[in-house]
Amino acid sequence: MRNFFQFEQLGTNYKREIIGGLTTFLSMAYILVVNPLTLTLQSVPDLPDSMRMDAGAVFVATALAAAIGSLIMGLLAKYPIALAPGMGLNAFFAYTVVLTMGVSWQSALTGVLISGLIFIALTLTGLREKIINSIPAELKFAVGAGIGLFITFVGFQNAGIIVNNDAVLVGVGDLTHGNTLLAIFGIVVTVILMTKGVKGGIFIGMVATAIVGMVAGLIDTPKGIVDAAPSLAPTFGAALDPLFNDAGSIFTIQMLVVVLTFLFVDFFDTAGTLVAVANQAGLMKNNKLPRAGKALFADSCATVVGAILGTSTTTSYIESSAGVAAGARTGFASVVTGILFLLSIFFFPLLAVITAPVTAPALIIVGVLMVSSLGEIDWKKFEIAVPAFLTIVAMPLTYSIATGIAIGFIFYPITMMIKGRRKEIHPIMYGLFVIFVLYFIFIA
């Protein structure tokens, strides 16, 4: 085992890898709670049951997708990078594709599955890296920041801090309401923990908020801690149903936009995470990522597996950097994280205590982490600032990640051509321009 993971060459040992794997798990364990709440649209009242996924099945699918993805990454690519259904992508899945576009969650899972299969094909042919390189860096950073603002907006809504206001669209909610006060408490605690650099600060903040909520009588005490795993039947294989029973709903411009968005966001989320964590761990060689193909293949396979199980796109997690900071240097840490996700399946009863006010702080803090890419955009160049800004601001204001991406990608070739920088525009960007123009025509 030590030789397989090259412990000696990388200067690590079992203790460091186990602690690193545990730290990564604690840092990203919030997804076990947030993902079911997001995909079931718990924060949206008065929806028909047909629009909501089964919470228990999504919980199991989330844990299994994270476990399988992390194990593949650890054993195949041998990187200390864990995977799980991605934040931002799950919000796009639930709030944009299902809630706004009116696509069934089964067809949305089909979109995830198709994007995963395309990922595998692009990875095996080497095209994935070429496509990543064709998108200007400024728009990559803008998409990440925009999703961060969108997630934060959802978090403030779930907390009751931001509410509907017919006069000015949105306004401040009742800050004296019990659940809102509980969410504010959670935000303060999580901010303190993250500022002090506490490992797993987001997860610990959620636990603390849930405990305070139970003590205050705002959250019902769970009936148990350990129980048999919920059934996966409601979501398992649902991604395949539209392909065989309703193929007409798949081959549409609307579904093309959905698949492209899943592809685009996961493209850059994965690439950024791989490079960032590998740099932190000192694994980069001559500014290149060793075994990059295997890492991308692991990520692609995890998306396909997750879609079949019943969850949104599974991707590499930047929280893996917490495990690297704790000493992880090899894929053994990812194996540890994967095993912990498997064990977590039997703690489903605890999910009942994780309500919207408990998860709101996690969404807001994750948003803070995601908007850090704003500093990488050259705001002094107007032709860059316009598409980047519109991408970022349109996501929360239109309540649609896809719309934000579409607007930014339409304006980018326009401003660049007017500025006389036509030669810097990759041909793929022209293709995306046409696709997103058609996207708005379709909506109209």
Image (cartoon, rainbow, N blue to C red):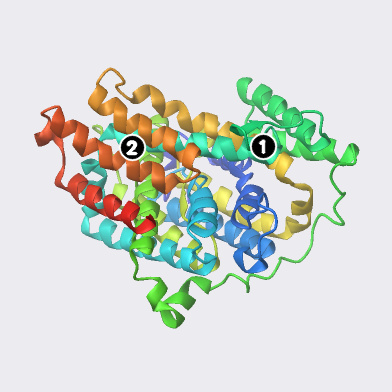
Residue 286, given in percent of the width and then of the height, sits at 23, 32
Give the vertical position of 25 relative to 417 (above or below).
Answer: below
Residue 260 lies in quadrant: bottom left
Q: Relative to the observer, which residue lies in front, 111 or 292?
A: 111
Q: Is residue 224 left or right of residue 195?
A: right
Q: Is residue 321 visible?
A: yes
Residue 117 lies in quadrant: bottom left
Q: Is residue 107 left or right of residue 264?
A: right
Give the vertical position of 361 relative to 354 (above or below).
Answer: above
Q: Is residue 362 visible?
A: no
Q: Is residue 233 left or right of residue 151?
A: right
- Indicate the quadrant containing the C terminus: top left, top right, bottom left or bottom right: bottom left
Q: Amino acid at mark 2?
A: Lys
Q: Which residue is mark 2?
A: 140
Q: Relative to the observer, which residue lies in front, 42 or 194?
A: 42
The residue lying furthest to the front in this view is 167
Give the vertical position of 369 relative to 116 (above or below).
Answer: above
Q: Earlier in the sequence, mark 2 or mark 1?
A: 2
Residue 59, given in percent of the width and then of the height, sits at 64, 58
Q: Amino acid at mark 1?
A: Val
Q: Relative to the observer, which residue lies in front, 77 or 366?
A: 366
